[in-house]
Image: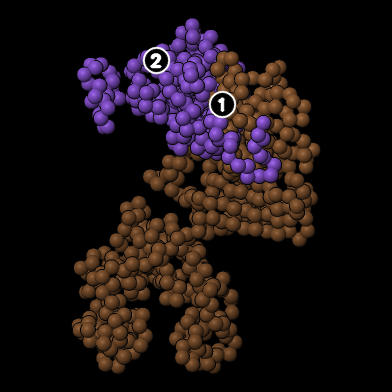
Chain colours: A brown, B purple
Amino acid sequence: MLWLCLHLPALPLEALGPPPETPLAVHERRGGKRILLAVNEAAVRQRIGPGMTVAAAQGLLPGLRVVERQPRAEKQALQHLADWACQFGSELFFDAPRRLLWLEIGSSLKYFGGLESLLPRLQTSLQGLGYSAGLGVAPTPEAAAWNAQAEDGPILKARDLQERLGYYPLGWLPFPEAVEGLASSGVKTLAELLRLPADGLARRFGPALPDYLQRLLGQRPDARERYQPPKVYRRRMEFLGAIESTEGLLFPIRRALTEFQGYLRARDSAVQHFTFEFEHEGHPRTRMELRLTAPARDAAHFLVVVRERLERLALPAPSLALTLRAERFLVPDLHQGDLFDQRLQQDGEWLGLLEKLQARLGADAIRFLGLRAEHLPERSWHAARQPQPGQAAFPPRPFWLLARPQPLQQPPRLRGRPERIEGGWWDGADAQRDYFLAESDSGSQLWVYRDALNGNWFMHGLWA
Amino acid sequence: MNPRLDPLRQVRGVWVGVENAPVPAVASGHLALDRQLPGHGWPRGSLVEILTAAPGIGEVSLLLPALRRLAQEKRVAFVQPPFVPYAPSLAQSGLPLERVAWIDAAGDEAQWAAEQSLRSGAVSAVLYWGASVDPLDLRRLQLAAEASQALLFLFRPMSALAAPSTAAVRMALNPQNGKLRIDLLKARGGRPGVLQVDPFRRTAPPRASDFLAPATSPVRRAALT
């Protein structure tokens, strides 16, 4: 295992969005004091720096804007960053209060061309996202965190840990009380701390400290809960008033797609499949599923595809809201590489086939079957252009259904007892039928029914 | 085969060799049939020709165990089916509906669609109901199946029995005592012969008792006539 740690000292500031031109600082309450945690460039130019008290800083620069640290925004920013960082390694976790994010890179290092190529690439991308980070690399997560603060070159071997970490200042130890206590007894570096007996440390500062040191040096495993990236993008937009026409939907759709594009760009990812759902009053939602022939993240491209589908979409009622959903995010850079997902290639082949067949046979010639929770057999299925999700439980049913029940001149040889199916009187298709299994002279297994209203016999299916 | 070996063949794990090199195959799910088929299953990348006297004798159910597997691998295409493939039945059979595409075309276009599907590499099996396919076209379809290692099940009426066929497996199906008699006319690399299977073993048609379940909905109830 090789851990990469991102140390984000300015996160409290960066999490608040693009920094203003005027001096700004974020503070945190420690004891009774308000201490500056991070300051923007405009403030640095006025000699304001982290560690100052708010009172002192405002004394120096009366125009300084000071805001309190916002843990929620920081956590969200780290989550976004983690989503984005997933492309560099699958195992990651972060510690929002300490402004640290870890990434296991041992398994993907070769793919990214080694540290020499990975680290600069990460730095550049992070700057593009608006973050300044120190990068550290070490065989244990905590050592990587120290290394990220020292920024004195990666530590690759576990046996180098003690020597390299030994010089690091003890102030980075995430035990502020212990740091103070040790400093007062003259212990200032990690090497000095490690010379003290562990049981003595445990007695004085509690067992957490020696435990931490063991994890730091890899003498004890450091198990952390891994961050799980969300698998779904979901954006719901309510309209101010009901939108009547599909043309009118284009405006909110464009906005949703533009946001979505931003989301994808921030994550350096793309999609091949996404869904729009339109909500109506008194009607079920209308679902529009979009599949692209190749992964994409360009809003304009999305819009072309959506517009084409929208023209053919029949909406049962005016729309009140839309939801854009997507899952299975792809990394565009990796498509040609070894990590190419076979399943996606298969989808590519399938879409190619679909396009070819539709071009010659018409878009409606390629159908997917769907279920409907209806009683009448002819109503409990439907065909659609897109694969249909859905489940419904039915009694045993034959493989073939006749598009139209076929009248029988005489009752066939019946087997078993009837299944009474009634339905549709509430929507004008009154029916009462007794379905039977029957056998034809040629040995075919038929699904037949007697219309209970007029006594006529019909064949409706075959058990193939 | 030497009859003295028969007891051995009952032992689990004893593999019965066939004449040729192993053929990649998908188990049919019917032991009696697998024993006769090349590679002990439907041979991948081949044309399997199925002749039926009438529809509705279990000709599709016969394929279901293999189709369940094939639909997991890639998509399955139904080309020019004679009736509507009934979604509730497919779902009951364990076929994922989103993996089954129904291609509604006829004549030359159906044959073209079957060939394109086979060539695409996007499907693991094509079920094609093509009454009149001439031998040359049959050969084309077979080559397309070979190229992508997909399975082509071609359904034809019994009247096609006299027509020459290049199929790797050719069988005639007839109903027999509520089961299915299979005349395995040709099985390249396997053993032709006559056997009987129960295609409806796990699926429909239902026994009479299936209809006696108490009705759960007010609209559907068993009428006791």
Residue under circle 2?
B194
Badge 1: few (under 14), some or many (20 or more) residues near its Cα, within 10 Å?
many
- Quadrant of the rendered structure where residue B42 is? top left
Q: Chain of mark 1?
A: A
Regarding mark 2 in the picture, which secondary structure is present there?
Answer: strand
* Residue A339 horizontal/vertical position (percent): 40, 46
Amino acid type at mark 1: Trp
Residue drawn at (51%, 73%) of the image:
A74
* Residue A139 horizontal/vertical position (percent): 28, 65
In the displayed image of the protein, which residue is found farthest to the front? Answer: B225
Regarding mark 1 in the picture, which secondary structure is present there?
Answer: loop
* Residue B153 horizontal/vertical position (percent): 48, 22
Q: Which mark is residue A463?
A: 1
- Quadrant of the rendered structure where residue A132 is? bottom left
Q: Quadrant of the C terminus of chain A?
A: top right
Q: Looking at the image, which is closer to me, A308 or A204? A: A204
Residue drawn at (59%, 87%) of the image:
A63
Q: Looking at the image, which is closer to me, B138 or A147? A: B138
Q: Is residue B81 visible?
A: no
Q: Chain of mark 2?
A: B
